[in-house]
Image (cartoon, rainbow, N blue to C red):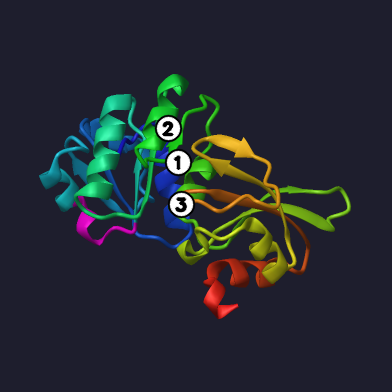
């Protein structure tokens, strides 16, 4: 939802990755930002209107991003996408950082920083696999955010480390960074950031994507 600079960039980035995309905006002229190469669906209307969402294909959607210029519209549409239509991967852009934590506690992941990038949003829409966040100058060590299967929720992070051989550098929980210790237990919604050697990330991904019973 939203075909401004963020929405149009995001739409093209997702389409370039092979995903089918629908974009909603209340102003039909906003779709000019997409250019002639965009092959997705363009729907004019309010992104929190259920009929508009259905027209855009929300019932078959695997992810939804609310990136219009209005905080209230973004949060409302994101909550409808998740709570009414059951879309699992939802993110809302919020201009007011003071309100972002409130929405995080409502279960809506938010991107609140003004110098946002489309890549930050894609990490929430497409959680599978690992997204590299940093590499050391030698290219040997990588910091990456890795998707964790919900079956690991309630288990200590040390169990994940033993099973994968990776070191969990930190967690992002409700918008705040946490340095885990031996007693830290993974909670629903935690983002897990690991330090690994290059060449081992595939094994780490497989362990994290499997439940503890499968390891």
Q: Position of residue 21 (x, y in %)?
A: 33, 54
Q: Secondary structure at mark 2?
A: helix
Q: Are marks 2 and 1 in contact (CB under 8 Å)?
A: yes
For residue 5, the mark is 2
Q: Residue at x 47, y 56 (%)?
A: 126
Task: Please state which of residues 122 and 148 is positioned toward the viewer in this rendering.
Answer: 148
> Closer to the N terminus: mark 3 or mark 2?
2
Give the camera-side residue of 16 and 61.
61
Q: Viewer-nearest of labels 3 and 1?
A: 3
Above/below status of 205 relative to 93: below
For the magenta stretch, what is the residue range? 56-62
The quarter of the rendered structure image containing the N terminus is top left
Instruction: From the viewer's perspective, tell me whether residue 115 is left or right of residue 158.
Output: left
Q: Position of residue 89 (x, y in %)?
A: 38, 52
Q: On the rendered image, what quadrant is the C terminus found in?
A: bottom right
Q: CA distance from mark 3 to mark 1?
A: 30 Å
Q: 21 above or below 29?
A: below
Crowdedness near tag 2: few (<14), some (14–19) or many (≥20) residues, C-alpha within 10 Å:
some
* Secondary structure under the numbered disc 1 in the rendered image: helix
Q: Who comes first in sequence, dot 3 or dot 1?
A: 1
**Residue 169 in magenta stretch:** no
Numbered badge on residue 188: 3
Instruction: Describe residue 132's horizontal placement relative to residue 2 as left or right.
Output: right
Q: Residue 70, can we see it?
A: no
Secondary structure under tag 3 reads loop
Q: Is residue 42 left or right of residue 39?
A: left
Tell me, yes or no, whether the two marked residues, 3 and 1, touch with CB atoms within 8 Å. Answer: no
């Amino acid at each position: 939802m939203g075909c401004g600079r963020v929405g149009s960039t995001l739409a093209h980035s997702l389409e370039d990755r092979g995903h089918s995309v629908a974009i909603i905006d209340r102003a039909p002229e906003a779709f000019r930002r997409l250019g002639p190469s965009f092959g997705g669906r363009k729907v004019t209307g309010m992104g929190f209107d259920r009929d508009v969402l259905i027209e855009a294909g929300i019932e078959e959607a695997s992810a939804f991003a609310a990136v219009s210029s209005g905080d209230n519209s973004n949060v409302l549409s994101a909550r409808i996408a998740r709570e009414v239509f059951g879309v699992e991967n939802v993110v809302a852009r919020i201009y007011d950082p003071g309100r972002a934590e409130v929405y995080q506690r409502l279960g809506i992941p938010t991107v609140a920083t003004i110098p946002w990038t489309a890549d930050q949003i894609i990490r929430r829409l497409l959680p599978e696999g690992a997204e590299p966040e940093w590499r050391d100058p030698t290219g040997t060590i990588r910091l990456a955010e890795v998707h964790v299967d919900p079956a690991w929720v309630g288990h200590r992070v040390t169990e994940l480390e033993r099973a994968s051989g990776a070191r969990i550098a930190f967690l992002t929980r409700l918008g705040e960074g946490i340095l885990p210790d031996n007693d830290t237990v993974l909670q629903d919604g935690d983002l897990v950031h690991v330090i690994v050697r290059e060449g081992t990330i595939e094994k780490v991904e497989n362990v994290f994507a499997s439940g503890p019973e499968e390891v």
